[in-house]
Image (cartoon, rainbow, N blue to C red):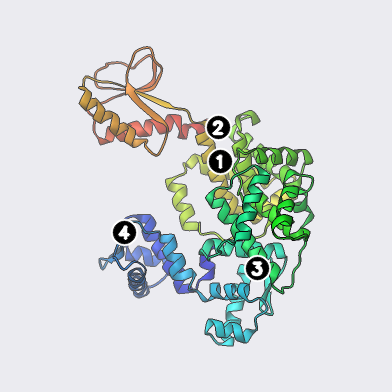
């Protein structure tokens, strides 16, 4: 599900509108926007006015605004504004469906009367709301009965972990949890990142609250998940910390945290505990390990590489990607189709998209039914994730690119040219620009004097004096096409 699934129709349209304007970075015609949002011009004008009012409340300093020229709309910001945070705080956190789910979390088993009263709606409206959130919960294999979520307790905790992670719901730490995390780090010989600590803290807070509440609890862990931490290095260390700080002996609490640690990517890929876990996981030939190996094999085939060319970091990345849908049903994402399309056209090359399609088609022909079902049931998630894996592979394969300058310019002008070129690659490739010296190997020589190509360079580019902006762009594209985009072409 997406965050928009928690919103009413008008708020969903408002969210899509502000995202479109933000991603466009320029004015969009009202006619185009009305067509894409499937609303009338008058409704679009009403949404525009609503956004202007909401932005004024959210950011009264006018650092962000929606400009209406009569024929077009443009979103502008003078400073730093998180559009995602604006959407969450202005629409998601205030939506009745979201508040309903939070009330059920805070008071499981609450009566319909008290639920309606807490939301300030009628009981008839409450039943309509419960019907609206049914598809949202169905993705997590959950239902609402008698004021509480019914289903696997592992799934209930995962649902609220996702929901609160999306909405920014405050889940403050406690001294016991703080000390527990410190103990866990010492046991594992691992230091959680700040982000990972927040993930672990959120899960533990939700778990402790659920454990203290009188709730109907299906505290079973499926066998295919249990095999991931049984006979492995993780379970005993987590159990030791639980017994020391929470005095809990119930296996479910230990096992549910182990599941979270394995499936929600809180470990980096270069730590000893990760390497040990991976080795044991492979030795045990778990179902998840077999799925990861099968997907890796399709990556190797599509890229025309051997396993020796595939670093451990990417194996860990694929494991993290597969572990989440392998252990849990459902997810809540803010990475909707608009963002997906935008990044696929602006960040990822066409070659990446083509390779993802090839890998998908091959996986859907796998002889493993569990693998086919996993991919088919979570394809939007895997589509986005595989794009990231292939981009990471590109960067793993990169080397330093050397550009030599051989010009008749003086030192000050050459410095300007060098800075112009370096600026082009500042957040991109690892490009080093230096003065040309014969005998060194260069990927590219830029010159305004030579009459023929250089023997000690792969490519030569001619400019007039300092060159112009088209030259700078052409050099950037030449490097990309031959040392970056070309990488996947050679593997496709």
Q: How far separated are the C-alphas under marks 3 and 4?
A: 40 Å
332 to the left or right of 28: right
Of the pair 374 and 428, the residue shown nearer to us: 428
Question: At x 66% / y 49%, what residue is drawn?
Answer: 184
Question: At x 60% / y 29%, what residue is drawn?
Answer: 309
Q: On the image, numbered disc 2 is attached to which residue?
A: 491
Badges 1 and 2: C-beta atoms under 8 Å apart?
yes
**Mark 4 residue crowding within 10 angstroms, few (<14) / some (14–19) / many (20+):** few
113 to the left or right of 285: left
The image quarter in which residue 203 lies: bottom right
Return the mark for residue 355. 1
Q: On the image, numbered disc 3 is attached to which residue?
A: 209
**Mark 2 residue crowding within 10 angstroms, few (<14) / some (14–19) / many (20+):** some
When the figure is inspected, residue 248 is found, relative to residue 407, above or below; the finding is below
Badges 2 and 4: C-beta atoms under 8 Å apart?
no
If you read the primary sequence from the N terminus, does the residue marked by circle 2 or circle 3 appear first?
Answer: 3
**Mark 1 residue crowding within 10 angstroms, few (<14) / some (14–19) / many (20+):** many
Which element type, helix, strand or loop, lies under badge 2? Answer: helix
If you read the primary sequence from the N terminus, does the residue marked by circle 2 or circle 4 appear first?
Answer: 4
Q: How far separated are the C-alphas under marks 1 and 2?
A: 9 Å
Query: In what quadrant of the picture does the N terminus appear?
Result: bottom right
Query: In what quadrant of the picture does the C terminus appear?
Result: top right
Residue 144: image x %, image y %? 67, 75
When the figure is inspected, residue 109 is found, relative to residue 218, above or below; the finding is below
If you read the primary sequence from the N terminus, does the residue marked by circle 1 or circle 2 appear first?
Answer: 1
Residue 286: image x %, image y %? 76, 45
Return the mark for residue 77. 4
Q: How far separated are the C-alphas under marks 2 and 3?
A: 50 Å
């Amino acid at each position: 599900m997406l965050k928009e699934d928690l919103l009413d129709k008008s708020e969903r349209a408002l969210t899509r509108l502000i995202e479109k304007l933000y991603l466009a970075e320029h004015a969009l015609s009202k006619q185009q926007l009305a067509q894409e949002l499937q609303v009338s011009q008058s409704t679009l004008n009403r949404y525009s006015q609503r956004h202007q009012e909401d932005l004024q409340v959210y950011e009264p300093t006018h650092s962000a605004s929606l400009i209406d020229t009569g024929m077009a709309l443009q979103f502008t910001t003078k400073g730093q504004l998180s559009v995602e945070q604006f959407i969450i705080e202005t629409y998601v956190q205030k939506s009745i469906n979201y508040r309903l789910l939070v009330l059920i979390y805070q008071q499981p088993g609450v009566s319909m009367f008290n639920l309606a009263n807490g939301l300030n709606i009628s009981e008839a409206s409450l039943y309509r709301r419960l019907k609206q959130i049914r598809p949202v919960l169905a993705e997590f294999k959950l239902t609402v009965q008698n004021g509480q979520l019914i289903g696997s307790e592992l799934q209930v905790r995962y649902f609220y972990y996702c929901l609160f992670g999306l909405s920014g719901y405050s889940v403050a730490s406690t001294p016991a949890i703080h000390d527990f995390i410190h103990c866990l780090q010492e046991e594992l010989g691992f230091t959680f990142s700040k982000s990972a600590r927040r993930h672990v803290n959120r899960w533990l807070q939700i778990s402790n609250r659920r454990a203290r509440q009188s709730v109907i609890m299906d505290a079973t862990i499926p066998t295919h998940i249990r095999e991931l931490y049984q006979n492995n290095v993780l379970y005993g260390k987590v159990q030791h910390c639980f017994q020391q700080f929470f005095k809990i002996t119930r296996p479910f609490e230990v096992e549910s945290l182990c599941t979270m640690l394995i499936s929600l990517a809180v470990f980096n890929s270069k730590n000893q505990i990760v390497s040990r876990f991976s080795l044991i996981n492979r030795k045990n030939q778990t179902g998840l390990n077999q799925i990861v190996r099968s997907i890796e094999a399709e990556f190797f085939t599509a890229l025309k590489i051997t396993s020796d060319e595939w670093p451990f970091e990417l194996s860990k990345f694929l494991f993290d990607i597969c572990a989440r849908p392998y252990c849990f049903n459902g997810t809540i994402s803010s990475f909707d189709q608009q963002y997906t399309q935008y990044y696929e056209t602006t960040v990822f090359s066409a070659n990446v998209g083509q390779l993802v399609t090839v890998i998908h088609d091959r996986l859907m022909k796998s002889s493993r039914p569990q693998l086919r079902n996993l991919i088919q049931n979570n394809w939007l998630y895997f589509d986005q994730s595989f794009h990231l894996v292939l981009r990471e592979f590109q960067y793993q394969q990169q080397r330093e690119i050397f550009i030599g300058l051989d010009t008749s310019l003086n030192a000050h002008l050459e410095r300007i040219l060098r800075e112009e070129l370096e600026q082009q690659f500042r957040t991109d490739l690892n490009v080093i620009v230096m003065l040309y010296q014969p005998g060194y190997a260069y990927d590219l020589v830029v010159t305004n004097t030579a009459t023929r190509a250089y023997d000690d360079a792969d490519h030569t580019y001619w400019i007039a004096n300092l060159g112009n902006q088209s030259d700078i762009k052409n050099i950037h594209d030449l490097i990309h096409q031959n040392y970056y985009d070309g990488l996947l072409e050679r593997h496709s």
